[in-house]
Amino acid sequence: MKKDFQKTCVLKGGFSTEREISLLSGSGMAEAARSLGYEVSEFDFTGDVYALLAFLKAEDPDCVINGLHGAGGEDGNIQAILNLLKIPYTHSGVLASSVAMDKYISGLIFQQNGIRVPKNRQYYWEAFKAKPDFPLPFVIKPINGGSSCGVFIINKLSELDKVEWTYGDKVLVSEYIPGLELSIGVLDGRALEVTNIVVKKGFYDYKNKYTDGAAYHELPANIPQKVRREAMAWAEKTHALLECRGVTRTDFRYNDVTKELFVLELNTQPGMSPLSLVPEQAKLVGISFEELVERLIQEACYDEM
């Protein structure tokens, strides 16, 4: 039965390193919701909770479209506020959001449930930089973060000296997996399709993600059917294990030499501009961007306490 939502509020922006991408996601979803006939308001959340509460009280929305990415919007904090206010919201709840945001903890959960992940260890940054004890080559990245911000591939230890680390006290150190960069969106528990992200130079870092022409999306990915089936099954399984809802995106590396697939992370707030990975995959399987947004709105809810 269709929920009788009339007014919806789109939260976008945020204060994380992914702010600019969130503004695009939020604006794209707001435009789609308006085209569907919803009364839409937009709020650029900068971290001022009092301003957010005043806005929500004034607007009194039937539901919230969460277009935030990264810290504050993807880690369970905004979800907890909306739970307390009993305002239905899109995407995953508090527990799924907070666990998925922690790449180390979520990786342990995946590994314990038969999903291959890279060898990972978490360190305090200053201690690790002073005495790195992880086999080369390795990747360093924030424990909590997205859009490949703060990701560095280290091939020799001298490269650590050039890293300007501004992503908190802790760091996740992972074995480097050569091969293909794959990504799969999951909607309502079902995998959409597999994208192979091909980068012209370097790796899929923030610059290559958001620089026009720096990378292209091979969709569907030209990979063996056995690998495709395994990747889609793992994407659905990661979504289910963390009890996610709505839409998520799971990122992989596929070593095409050893033929091994690895899950890197699950994103509970994937990019939602019309040209982002998940909307591209949805379009391929016959789901328009407007229908995708409509399904997210109709599944909006808050965690019962």
Image (cartoon, helix red, strand yellow):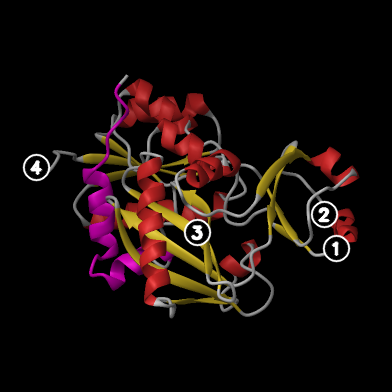
Q: Is residue 231 left or right of residue 197?
A: left
Q: Distance between the Cα atoms at labels 1 and 3?
A: 25 Å
Q: Position of residue 11 (x, y in %)?
A: 42, 42
The residue beneath circle 3 is 251
For the residue marked with disc 4, what is the amino acid?
Answer: Met
The residue beneath circle 4 is 1
Instruction: Say which residue appears at 24% left-offset and 34% top-offset.
Output: 62
Graded by Cα atoms within 10 Å as few (under 14), some (14 to 19) or many (20 or more), the crowding at tag 3 reads: some
Query: From the viewer's perspective, is the residue at label 3 or at label 4 nearer?
Result: 3
Q: Who comes first in sequence, dot 2 or dot 4?
A: 4
Looking at the rendering, the stretch of residues picked out in magenta corresponds to: 276-304
In the rendered image, the vertical position of residue 99 relative to residue 305, given as above or below: below
Q: Quadrant of the C terminus?
A: top left
Q: Distance between the Cα atoms at labels 4 and 1?
A: 58 Å
Q: Is there any visible trace of residue 249 in the rendered image?
A: yes
Q: Distance between the Cα atoms at labels 2 and 3?
A: 24 Å
Q: Which label is found at residue 156?
A: 1
For the residue marked with disc 2, what is the amino acid?
Answer: Val
Q: Main secondary structure of the magenta part?
A: helix
